[in-house]
């Protein structure tokens, strides 16, 4: 039995987004638990589908003693403030200093955190922890599929493993897999050799979905085949990267760990070659908002199942504020009667709807308050349903999540139903509609502020899924972004 410290610090940073992640964003609960620390950590994350819970279960199965550090997350946004990063990092260091003797550390990190003062938040956190615990203590880290892996992360972690699904329905499984790597290192007393490779192109957020090619085959066939062909190989991962971070190391990468340097290099080279060969296939149809609404109406007219439009450029899961109005305007202009827009994040409009009450008519300035290129959509609304934003997720990704989205309201304007929430969260779970009395399968058209994660829960209900591009900061095409820090030679 070993003493293993466990914790996590999660943020995916869109450096092109308008709103930063301050400390209070990590303190509060939304779709994920509020900051939990020490004795409160295990209760705080219990039953929630995140890597940490998978790791906790695997380490307990191996009969290890777990020492709680802290876990926190904030909805993806612009940079993490210096204050937030420094305060949370010091909490980690303080908890490790006072933990007593440790045999290992497991950390649930994202891999795409950028702060006001650092390009590589996770790399710097790992450096500080490594300086504290010394060179020999094993540190195992699980990362998001959209990690922008850096050389510093590789240097200071003993081993890393990365999600293999997008939508991320394998978060718990990845945490457990990473914990088993740590257990093996502790049992054998031998650290693995490492190999790290970076691709020379960017993968757009919507095109890396593992329900579709080429990502599907790369993760489901190629990666497992390389793993099975090499007995010395302990772990192999392919991170698709996060193209919305203007940093030197943004983009796809491959990480391999093995019993010899030769084996690690061979596996990393093989996986990178497979990824590079598929570069031209990472693409797909993206509709302008009006065109997407027009196509959705055409498909819906001959179907009893909903047509889904992903409002991808205002996805709170990619750093969007969740309050842009372009898709709503396109729905109204296109006379998409009966359609649902979910969710516009606007606490002031939610407050007004609650003050008016169910059944009332009220004039609202919906959304348009955070993205500089947008403006509020003023309209006469009928308040159809109110909710407190407290409900439990039911889908493959957010199942068990205790949502706390603040005041919510379902309003109708010009034949369009709009779900309004008070806290930023992408519309990825059908429970978000049911909380306000809407059965998703019965809606003709649903526009969701999400890029891909919604597919896990909504796609099985849908006649078809369209990707729409209304104005917003989660830019679907990396070729249109003005990168200043990205290393030279990276295609986009």
Image: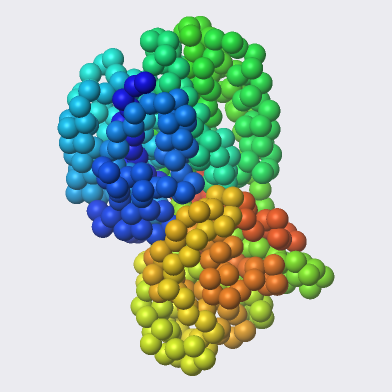
Residue 37 against residue 459 in the figure, above or below: above
Question: In the image, 169: left or right of 221?
Answer: left
Q: Residue 281's quadrant in the figure? A: top right
User: Where does the image place residue 295, in percent across and percent down from the top left?
Assistant: 72, 66
Left/right of residue 55 with respect to residue 443 in the rendered view? left
Residue at x-position 54% and y-position 75%: 436
Q: For the N terminus, give its image quadrant.
A: top left
Q: Which of 260 and 67 is in front in this view?
A: 67
Q: Which residue is drawn at 38% across and 26% down?
A: 64
Where is residue 167 drawn, in percent x and y? 57, 46
**Residue in the picture at 60% in, 12% down:** 230
Is the residue 465 above or below the residue 388 in the image? Answer: above
Q: Where is residue 39 in the image (x, y as percent from the top left)?
A: 27, 44
Q: Position of residue 332 (x, y in %)?
A: 60, 80
- Observer-nearest of 247 and 305: 305
On screen, residue 76 versus residue 284, left or right, reads left
In the rendered image, which quarter is residue 356 located in? bottom left
Note whether residue 484 is visible.
Answer: no
């Amino acid at each position: 039995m070993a003493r293993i410290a466990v914790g996590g610090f999660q943020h995916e940073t869109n450096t092109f987004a308008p709103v930063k992640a301050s400390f209070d964003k990590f303190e509060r609960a939304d779709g994920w638990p509020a900051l939990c620390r020490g004795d409160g950590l295990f209760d705080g994350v219990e039953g929630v589908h995140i890597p940490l819970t998978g790791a906790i279960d695997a380490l307990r199965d191996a009969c290890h003693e777990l020492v709680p550090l802290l876990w926190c997350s904030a909805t993806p946004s612009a940079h993490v403030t210096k204050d937030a990063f420094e305060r949370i990092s010091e909490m980690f260091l303080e908890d490790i200093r006072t933990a007593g003797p440790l045999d290992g550390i497991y950390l649930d990190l994202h891999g795409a955190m950028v702060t006001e003062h650092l390009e590589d938040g996770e790399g710097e956190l790992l450096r500080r922890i490594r300086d504290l615990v010394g060179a020999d203590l094993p540190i195992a880290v699980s990362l998001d599929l959209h990690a922008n892996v850096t050389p510093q992360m590789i240097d200071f972690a003993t081993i890393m493993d990365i999600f293999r699904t997008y939508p991320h329905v394998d978060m718990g499984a990845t945490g457990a897999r990473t914990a088993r790597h740590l257990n093996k290192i502790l049992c054998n007393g031998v650290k693995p050799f490492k190999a790290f490779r970076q691709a020379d192109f960017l993968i757009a957020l919507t095109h890396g979905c593992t329900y579709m090619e080429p990502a599907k085959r790369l993760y489901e066939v190629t990666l497992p085949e390389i793993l099975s062909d090499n007995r010395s190989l302990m772990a192999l991962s392919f991170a698709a990267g996060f193209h919305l971070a203007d940093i030197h190391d943004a983009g796809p990468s491959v990480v391999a760990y093995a019993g010899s340097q030769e084996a690690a290099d061979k596996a990393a080279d093989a996986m990178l070659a497979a990824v590079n060969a598929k570069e031209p296939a990472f693409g797909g149809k993206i509709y302008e908002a009006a065109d997407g609404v027009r196509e959705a109406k055409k498909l819906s007219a001959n179907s009893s199942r909903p047509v889904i439009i992903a409002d991808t450029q205002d996805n709170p899961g990619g750093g969007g504020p969740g309050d842009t109005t372009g898709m709503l305007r396109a729905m109204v202009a296109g006379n998409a009667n009966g359609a649902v827009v979910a969710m516009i994040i606007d606490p002031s409009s939610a407050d007004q709807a609650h003050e008016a009450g169910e059944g009332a008519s009220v004039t609202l300035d919906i959304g348009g308050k955070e993205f500089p290129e947008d403006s509020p959509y003023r309209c006469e609304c009928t308040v159809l349903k109110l909710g407190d934003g407290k409900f439990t997720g039911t889908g493959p990704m957010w199942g068990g999540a205790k949502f706390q989205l603040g005041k919510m309201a379902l309003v109708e304007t010009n034949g369009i139903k709009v779900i309004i929430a008070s806290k930023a969260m992408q519309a990825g779970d059908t429970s978000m509609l049911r909380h306000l009395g809407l059965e998703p399968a019965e809606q003709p058209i649903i526009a969701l502020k999400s890029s891909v994660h919604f597919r896990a829960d909504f796609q099985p209900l849908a006649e078809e899924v369209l990707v729409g591009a209304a104005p917003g900061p989660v830019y679907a095409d990396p070729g249109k972004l003005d990168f200043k820090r990205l290393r030279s030679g990276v295609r986009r």
